[in-house]
Amino acid sequence: MGSRLQPNDWSRAALEAIAEGGLGAVIIETLATRIGATKGSFYWHFADRAALIRGAAVLWEETRTSALIRDLQQVEEPRQRLHELFIRAFGDDRAGRIEAALIMQPEDPEVAEVVRRVTTRRVAFLANAFAEIGFTESEAQHRAVVAYGTYLGLFVVLAGNPNAAPSRGRPLDTFVGDLIDLLTRR
Amino acid sequence: MGSRLQPNDWSRAALEAIAEGGLGAVIIETLATRIGATKGSFYWHFADRAALIRGAAVLWEETRTSALIRDLQQVEEPRQRLHELFIRAFGDDRAGRIEAALIMQPEDPEVAEVVRRVTTRRVAFLANAFAEIGFTESEAQHRAVVAYGTYLGLFVVLAGNPNAAPSRGRPLDTFVGDLIDLLTRR
DNA sequence: ACCTGAACACCGTTCAAGT
DNA sequence: ACCTGAACACCGTTCAAGT
């Protein structure tokens, strides 16, 4: 029953595996068993394993950048927009693991291309918020780069140090508030 | 001639491979050929490939954290110390590629342990500088976490976007100066 | 104590043969 | 058009045999 498998089924399964165990967990035979197919069938839909990971990366771009930005554009007040962005960014562990795995792999040039696109769009989104708050274009750009860098880097700090900043007693909300204060100080 | 191969020879070769092509470039047979040994010999010195990568990680900890902190402790003035730290941090491409590869791999628990140690020491070093500048303990800690996060995240921004912040016309020195201004603003 | 080379295991990839 | 299962390649790992 149900229609045949689509490439998206494979990409989704790959993204799930990445969330659970990083890129190393993307094992074609394991995914095949999980979605009820065979290794051989995989190669009808994809050129190779790298193409599957690219598929997962594009899926990730859609959900964690395109859709996220669409949602947050609704929030008028720029500080409030940044606040909700950071809450959503730091609040989702599963998403965080995917970010870490995909962003830090410049191995495949096409995944690097997706990452570059995501980076550009996210930094532009941040710069826009800073500009609305009242910073000049170049100040806004600089702070956006620092803010995004901070976001990415915090994964590492938090991953290795579960009792680091946000959880060290104070709730995520307070941590994000402090962070935005620091980033928007003149 | 020369004495036999030491485990450190393997670790050094692995670190070199990581700098050139990331963790995926750590191929035992390739390293063996490069240092004039065989695959089989490798397994006399190391339990497995993961142990080799741990060896490389420990080597990296010594040169890029222990030795670095020792050097920079000499610089009395804390702002100056931060400045030199960032210059050295962002100025070395080879080192940057190693950082990216090792830090973002929570796969192996022992590498994760080294990364945790490195993170703790680096954040403490930064917090100390901020405290000397005159921030309270908790302010200094918070800014240290943000600063280190920024450092890590900038690799990604810069890797994907060669014409991003530092190279966008202005020299590294100016970029670092601006960054420190932002991080030390009250 | 340390090394070699052959063997095996795992998993990515290909492909002839099926429906 | 899509899938299967067997075959092969690559590389990590083991191990009996050497020095």
Image: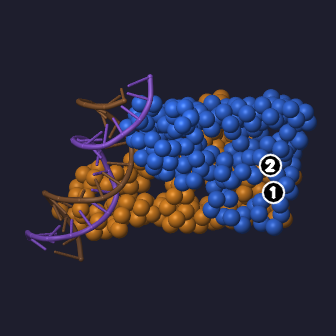
Chain colours: A orange, B blue, C purple, D brown
Which residue appears at 75% of the width and 52% of the height? B91
Q: Picture coordinates of residue B105 (x, y %)? A: 52, 43
A65 is higher (above) or lower (below) than B127: below
Where residue B155 appears, as percent x and y from the top left, is 66, 53
Q: Mark 2 points at which residue?
A: B87
Chain under disc 1: B
Q: Can residue A94 be seen in this view?
A: no
In the image, taking residue A43 as reference, residue A129 lies left or right, namely right
User: Quadrant of the rendered structure where residue A32 is?
Assistant: bottom left
Type of residue at label 2? Ile
Asked which secondary structure carries label 2, the reply is helix
Left or right of residue C1, residue B122 in this image: right
The numbered mark at residue B172 is 1
Dot 1: element: helix
- The residue located at (23%, 67%) in the rendering is A4
Q: In which quarter of the image is residue A8?
A: bottom left
Say whether disc 1 or disc 2 marks the residue closer to the N-terminus.
2
Q: Do labels 1 and 2 share a chain?
A: yes
Circles 1 and 2 in contact, beta carbons < 8 Å: yes
**Residue at image point 68% right, 53% down:** B93
Label 1 vs label 2: CA separation? 7 Å
Residue B10 appears in the figure: yes
Q: Nearer the viewer, residue B2 or A42?
A: B2
Tell me the chain of label 2: B
Please report the residue visible at 62 percent of the width from the left and 45 percent of the height from the top. B99
